[in-house]
Image (spheres, helix red, strand yellow):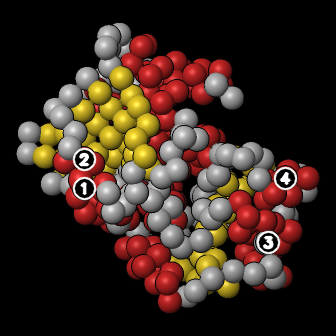
């Protein structure tokens, strides 16, 4: 059987390390996992051209919205967040799911945020990665969310999803300000879903936060991660998310429990 990760650029993807380690640990002889360069426009034709030996696809940017549109069946959570990072072959076509939510849930567990005491979070960015983040935060018990974005109008879908998840929302512009610092300090966790260069421009304002998740894993550490660490805060990076989202993908592709220890070891060995 075969699986692959689709994206552009794709050469940096660490997903093959995780999936191949999982298949070996599960004793799935002959299973392969490859990188396929593919943008959003070319995704339908590429997937149409794959033979029946392909049982599952991981989808990274910029194809997550296209993957959701392409799918024959869609999980409720993928429909809620409006994107899919996972396609699984079925008898009727392709099933779409968003295991990015599992990735963020794992990062929240890793960082130890206590939402029972402080049910507040800050999310930097309002793009595709922000939506699965909101889903994980809602499940974790966050009840008040601050969204930091360059354009309030473009963040409206973020507000809608937060409302569906039972979270009150306020908005801050994407700029270093005392208001941003106050929000980050008050929150149980601040999560950056934007590129490293973008978060660097507001890193000083976020640095006093107690706990920060940065979805980036290459290059690492990011300027934001450095700023928070230097100020004494706790930072979790994108590799934790990558690992936790891959667990569920492996289970969807193989129908077997993910060998978590083997996958985590593979990520450590490949650093």
Task: State the mark number for residue 47.
Answer: 2
The image shows residue 9 at horizontal and vertical percentages of 52, 50
Task: Indicate which label's residue lies in the foreground, 4 or 1.
Answer: 1
Q: CA distance from mark 4 to mark 3?
A: 13 Å
- Whichever of labels 4 and 1 marks the residue nearer the N terminus, that label is 1
Q: Are marks 1 and 3 in contact (CB under 8 Å)?
A: no
- Whichever of labels 1 and 3 marks the residue nearer the N terminus, that label is 1
Q: CA distance from mark 1 to mark 2?
A: 5 Å
- Please say if 246 is above or below 154: above
- Please say if 195 is above or below 147: above
Q: Are marks 3 and 2 in contact (CB under 8 Å)?
A: no
The image shows residue 99 at horizontal and vertical percentages of 40, 47
The answer to whether residue 134 is visible is no
Task: Please tell me which residue is depicted at 71% across the width and 69% down the height of the picture.
Answer: 198
Q: CA distance from mark 4 to mark 1?
A: 40 Å
Q: Are marks 1 and 2 in contact (CB under 8 Å)?
A: yes
- Whichever of labels 2 and 4 marks the residue nearer the N terminus, that label is 2
Task: Please tell me which residue is depicted at 60% across the width and 27% down the height of the picture.
Answer: 267
Left or right: 223 as drawn, with respect to 121: right
Q: Are marks 2 and 4 in contact (CB under 8 Å)?
A: no
- Whichever of labels 3 and 2 marks the residue nearer the N terminus, that label is 2
The answer to whether residue 10 is visible is yes
Residue identified by numbered label 4: 226
Residue identified by numbered label 3: 201
Task: Indicate which label's residue lies in the foreground, 4 or 3.
Answer: 3
């Amino acid at each position: 059987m075969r699986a692959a990760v689709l994206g552009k650029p794709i050469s940096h993807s660490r997903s093959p390390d995780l999936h191949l380690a999982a298949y070996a640990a599960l004793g799935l002889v002959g299973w392969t996992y490859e990188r396929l360069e593919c943008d959003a426009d070319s995704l339908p034709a590429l997937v149409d051209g794959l033979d029946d030996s392909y049982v599952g696809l991981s989808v990274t940017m910029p194809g997550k919205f296209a993957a959701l549109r392409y799918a024959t069946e869609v999980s409720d959570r993928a429909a809620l967040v409006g994107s899919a990072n996972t396609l699984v072959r079925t008898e009727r076509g392709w099933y779409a799911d968003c295991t990015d939510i599992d990735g963020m849930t794992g990062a929240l567990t890793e960082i130890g945020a206590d939402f029972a005491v402080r049910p507040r979070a800050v999310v930097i960015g309002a793009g595709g990665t922000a939506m699965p983040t909101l889903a994980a935060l809602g499940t974790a018990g966050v009840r008040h969310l601050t969204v930091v974005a360059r354009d309030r109008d473009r963040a409206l879908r973020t507000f809608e999803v937060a409302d569906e998840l039972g979270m009150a929302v306020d908005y801050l512009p994407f700029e270093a300000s005392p208001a941003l610092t106050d929000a980050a300090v008050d929150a149980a966790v601040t999560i950056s879903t934007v590129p490293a260069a973008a978060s660097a421009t507001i890193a000083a304002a976020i640095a006093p936060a107690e706990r920060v998740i940065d979805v980036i894993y290459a290059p690492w550490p990011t300027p934001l991660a450095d700023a928070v660490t230097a100020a004494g805060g706790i930072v979790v990076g994108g590799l934790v998310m990558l690992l936790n989202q891959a667990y569920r993908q492996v289970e969807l592709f193989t129908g077997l429990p993910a060998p978590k220890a083997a996958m985590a070891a593979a990520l450590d060995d490949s650093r």
